[in-house]
Amino acid sequence: MMCNFLKLTTAAIVLASTPVFAQIDGTADDDIDWSLYEDLGFEDESMKRYANAKIEGLSPAKLITLGYDFQGPYTINAASEGAAILDQNEEEFPKQQEYLVNSTGGVRASFNLPVISQNNLVWQMGANYWNTSYNYAEAPNPNDNAVNPLHRTLSEHGLRTSGISTTIYKPLDDTQFILFQGSADLSGTYGASAMPAQYLKYSAAALWGKRPTEKKQWGVGLARTYRVGELNYIPVILYNKTSANNKWGTEALFPARVHVRRTINPRNMLFLGYELQGQSFRMYENLPGFDLRDEDLEIRRGEIRVRAVYEFSLKNFIWMSIQAGYRINYRYDVDRLEAGPDIYRAFGLIDGTPAYAQMNVLTNPFYVNISVNLVSP
């Protein structure tokens, strides 16, 4: 992990010294947490006024988060379709290799802290770490070449993501603003061995918006994202609104996430909605008996989480978040990147792009996510 931290620190320095629109996960994230900012306006009418980045009634900003994500039983049917993945003897793996996964779980940690917080500029930096372990009902034999490499690598290594992010909020006047968010993530099956920084995935989102009232803000923009598992460029729409009585609200950054908010009181909130999650993961660890490794295979993981969330204050600025819902598989396919560069399919609409090396089918489990958070005042 120390080696990964050093690589992420190096990546942060590189990103800070290069133009932000040079190649950009999914997870810029196109995931913009507007509640991270304090009140930017001044009451002194002699001074220029700027649009506040948050609205009244918005859920509190999570500065530091430590949580655990758990999925119940489901099946993974590997190589149900797709071009052949071959072993070193050029023999195709058997089709329809289905295994039962008893559970999937792992730690999720993140922090987002302000670097500059002024009335005319807010700059924030963050980092995250997600680990996912696969508990197979019957663990695949790691030395059996007849077992599909997807099952072998998930059972033995699992998946993890380490990343850094930056957010810049720039109000233009008392109602208009622009916002940029960028991230760089290392995602794959790496563990004790460090994955080279060349496998960083870059994401970004840029928006222009308006805050016409203290209870409403909206914006439109464009995102470069891996949120559904593979590279895509998509339009994004921001819409946050709080009702006149502060009891109901909407917090949305479509299509990444949409939630309806019910405020019981300022220290207890309920949410109902969905979120898209995903990333591309390098199968970095060597598989015994195969020539395939990091340069070859990449898992395109994307999912839709339909959920209910309850967030409440434990004490002062320490909050707990409990979410439960249904994880719907969107994509869990495998690309073979023999030439190295990423593959852009535009949701599969571009003809002539390479076929997936392996198309997989996952059934959909219920899931629970619990976290403790330090929130902003």
Image (cartoon, helix red, strand yellow):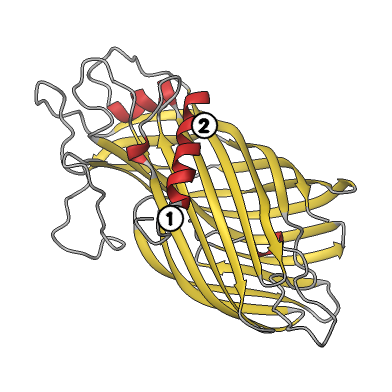
* Badge 1 density bin: few <14, some 14–19, many ≥20, Cα 10 Å: many
Q: Quadrant of residue 147?
A: top left
The numbered mark at residue 5 is: 2
Residue 32 at x, y = what percent? 58, 61
Q: Quadrant of residue 273?
A: bottom right
Of label 1 and label 2, which has the lower sequence position? 2
Residue 170 at x, y = what percent? 60, 71
Q: Is residue 23 above or below residue 12?
A: below
Using residue 331 as the reference point, say whether residue 55 is left or right of it. right
* Badge 2 density bin: few <14, some 14–19, many ≥20, Cα 10 Å: few
Q: Residue at x 65, y 41 (%)?
A: 368
Using residue 203 as the reference point, say whether residue 129 is left or right of it. right
- The amino acid type, in three-letter code, at marker 1 is Ser
* Camera sees residue 219: yes
Q: Residue at x 35, y 27 (%)?
A: 151
The residue beneath circle 1 is 203
At mark 1, the secondary structure is strand
